Amino acid sequence: MIDIKELWRKRQAQHFKEISRYLRYMLNDHLLIALLFLGGGGAYYYNYWLQDIPKNFPYAIIIALVLGLILTSSRIQTLVKEPDLVFLLPIEKKLAPYFQKAFWYSLFSQIYLLLIVFAVAAPLYLAVSDKTFSSLAAIFVIVLLCKAWNLLMTWFTQHYTENSTYYTDISIRLVLNIVLLYLLFSGASILYIGCVVVIMIGLLLYFHRAVENKGLKWDTLIELESKRMLTFYRIANLFTDVPKLKERVKKRAWLNWVTGFISYSKKNTFRYLFTRTFLRTSDYLGMYVRLTIIGGLIIYFVPFEYGKAFVMILFLYLTGYQLITLWRHHSLKIWVRLYPVSETSKLASYLQFLFQLLVVQSVLFTVILMLSAKIMTTIILLVAGIMFVYFFVFIYTKGKVRKLDRM
């Protein structure tokens, strides 16, 4: 007989052991120094900007959008594994204590992100709204309750097999989260806030009753856990070999035209491989697009030029840093070593490909800058962005990948 409570304790201990195993390598790197430098610079210019911020600045909608996206993306970390389809599926109805612990673990482990956003948003909220810190604390308590609501709603919808239910749930929760947060931060009437809260409670009770006799989608739970760990392993792979790193390949035939620009020659062997890997494997392309869109939106809405420059450089760095994993993506494959291509040619192909990706991102950011900044500022930031990309790729990244190869 399986002890449900003991099962969760063992799973959690194994999870912590697995995470800490790689964190020892990750936290010893100079990435922390770079992030502290960027964070310090951002805090300085953020404080400088707040001194002259206009009272009509749309702070409420900006904070509501950011927090709304974070709350909507909430998911319960169940730590389930593929063998559970055989061993735990037959006793699913007895697993309530296990999933309750998973809920509380997910809630408390995800609060840190809300704290970071609140730490950034608090000075803006207090500077523009003339509210007190106690009102901000009250809002934070409501946001925590909203976080729990999102986790429960996500959990209930995972009992459904229809994809339409999943997308409907995402859309409804996103709208309700943003509306509630906007009302809270804009100081709206308690009546309007109460109406939104009643709708949220009604939805929670409806789905709770609707899924009472439904079983869990174990395949979905296992897939979500696999994706979550895949993201962590990809980051950890920057610092050390990760044998458990699994690939997820999508054909994406509609992007085949990209590789058509690569001429057929021996020197372009790895250029073709890196391009195909970026377009098809794991989530490199998705990460690149997401960071470009998010960075572009922030650049557009940030009203002062120093802030736009900081955001542009920050997102170029974040994109480039995450793409360093592309260098070691095929490091554990023996057949790649059979290519009659030198390591020097391989490194040159990788650096050239990374440089072009980041230059394209710089140009896209510049196009957005043209909509919200002076032409001279746009030109200066484009030049600064390309100079940063050159330094990041051919000095920082080149040294980084050589260091990785020696490990």
Image (tube, helix red, strand yellow):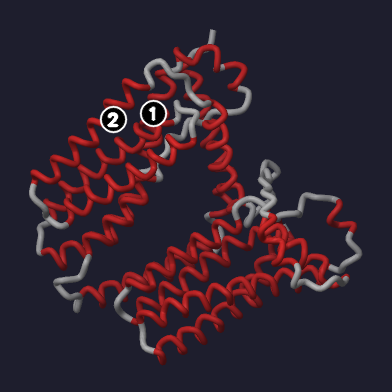
Which class describes the residues within 10 Å of circle 1: few (<14), some (14-19), or many (20+)? many
Amino acid on which disc 2 is placed: Leu
The residue identified by callout 1 is 156
Query: Residue shown at 26%/41% (left/top)?
Result: 144
- Quick one: quadrant of the C terminus? bottom right
Identify the residue position indicated by label 2 in the image.
Answer: 204
The residue lying at 69 percent from left, 55 percent from top is: 253
Q: Residue furthest bottom?
A: 376
Q: Position of residue 371 (x, y in %)?
A: 38, 80
User: Dot 2, crowdedness within 10 Å: few (<14), some or many (≥20)?
Assistant: some
Image disc number at residue 320: none
Q: Would you say 116 lies left or right of 291 here?
A: left
Amino acid type, residue under disc 1 in the picture = Phe
Task: Give percent across and percent down for residue 69.
Answer: 36, 51
Up the image or down, 45 lies above or below 2; here it is below
Kindly indicate whether the residue at mark 1 contacts the one at mark 2 (C-beta within 8 angstroms).
Answer: yes
| Mark closer to the chain start, 2 or 1 | 1
**Residue at the image point whose x is 42% and y is 24% from the top:** 99
Name the residue located 21 percent from the left edge and 47 percent from the top edge. Answer: 180
Q: Is residue 387 left or right of residue 399?
A: left
Compared to residue 77, the image places residue 311 above or below, namely: below
Please state which of residues 351 and 27 is positioned toward the viewer in this rendering.
351
Q: Quadrant of residue 56?
A: bottom left
